[in-house]
Image (spheres, grey):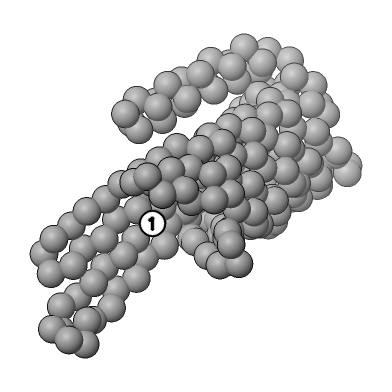
Amino acid sequence: MTRRLVLSTALMLAFAASALSQDRGFEVFGGYSYQNTGSQGVSQGMNGFNVALTGNMSKALGITGEVSRHSWGMSMVDPLDASVIDVNTSVLGFRVGPKLTSHMGDTASVFVQPTVGFYRMSAGSSVAGFTGSTSATGFTTAAGGGLDLRVSPRISVRPAQIDWIYLGSADIAGVSTGSSNGFRYSGGVVVKF
C-alpha cells in the first residue's frame, strides 16, 4: 500500500513538473531533516530526510510536492529478565503546495511554501522475540521557508529550511495519537533542470 502511494505521488509530481517546466524549468531538493513534534506536552525529536520536486511556473511562483520520512527508536534491557526491548516509530509525510521565491541577484534566493497533505505513522516494538507493529494515516500541513545559495548555474546549497509542522490526530490500534505541532529543519542540495 505504502509503495503504491509513494510511486503514484512521485509519478504525479514528475508529470506536473514536466508540464510546468516549459516556462522556467523544475528543481529537485534533497537533504537531511530533523523534525521535533509532540503532543500532550511530550516532545519527540526524529532524524530523517526531506525530498521536494518543484515545477516553476514563473521566476517567482512554483508548485512543490515533497516527501519526508523521520524516525526514532531506542533499545533498553529489562532488568527483571535481561531481555532486550526495542521500540521504534516513523512518520512518512506527503505534502503539496505553492512555493513563492524572491531572488537576490544571481547568488541567493529566499522562499516560503505552505503545503498540505497526509502522513503515515508507524510504530513497532520487539520484546523477547515477539514483535508487533501498527500504523495509521492522518492529515498534515507545513508552512515555512528557507534560503538557497547558488554555487553553479544548476546547483544550489540550501543551508536552512525551517517549517512549522502540524500532524492531525490518527488512530493507532484504536488509540488516538492526538494532534501535534512542531518544527522541522532541513538542509541539503538543490539541482535545477
Residue 19 occupies quadrant = top right
Q: Image quadrant for the N terminus?
A: top left
Q: Where residue 89 appears, x then y in whole percent?
A: 38, 56
Q: Relative to the observer, which residue lies in front, 189 or 129?
A: 129
Which residue in the structure is indicated by mark 1? Answer: 89
Is residue 104 visible in the rendered structure shown here?
yes
Outermost residue, front side: 174
Is residue 189 visible in the rendered structure shown here?
no
Q: Where residue 70 appears, x then y in whole percent?
A: 47, 53
SS under mark 1? strand
Marks counted in the figure total 1
Q: Relative to the observer, which residue lies in front, 139 or 94?
A: 139
Instruction: Name the residue rendered at 18%, 67% in the picture.
Output: 127
Q: Relative to the observer, which residue lies in front, 95 or 60?
A: 95
User: What kind of residue is marked 1?
Assistant: Thr
Q: Image quadrant for the C terminus?
A: top right
Q: Where residue 91 appears, x then y in whole percent?
A: 45, 48
Image vertical order of residue 191 relative to residue 87, above or below: above
Instruction: Name the residue rendered at 83%, 29% in the picture.
Output: 60
Q: Where residue 157 appears, x then y in whole percent?
A: 66, 51
Label 1 crowding class (10 Å Cα cut-off): few <14, some 14-19, many 20+?
some
Q: Is residue 80 left or right of residue 92?
A: left
Q: Is residue 88 left or right of residue 79?
A: right
Q: Is residue 34 left or right of residue 62?
A: left
Q: Relative to the observer, which residue lies in front, 43 or 149?
A: 43
Outermost residue, right side: 105
Image vertical order of residue 118 relative to residue 69, above or below: above
Instruction: Name the residue rendered at 26%, 61% in the picture.
Output: 125
Outermost residue, bottom side: 79
Instruction: Name the residue rendered at 64%, 49% in the picture.
Output: 165
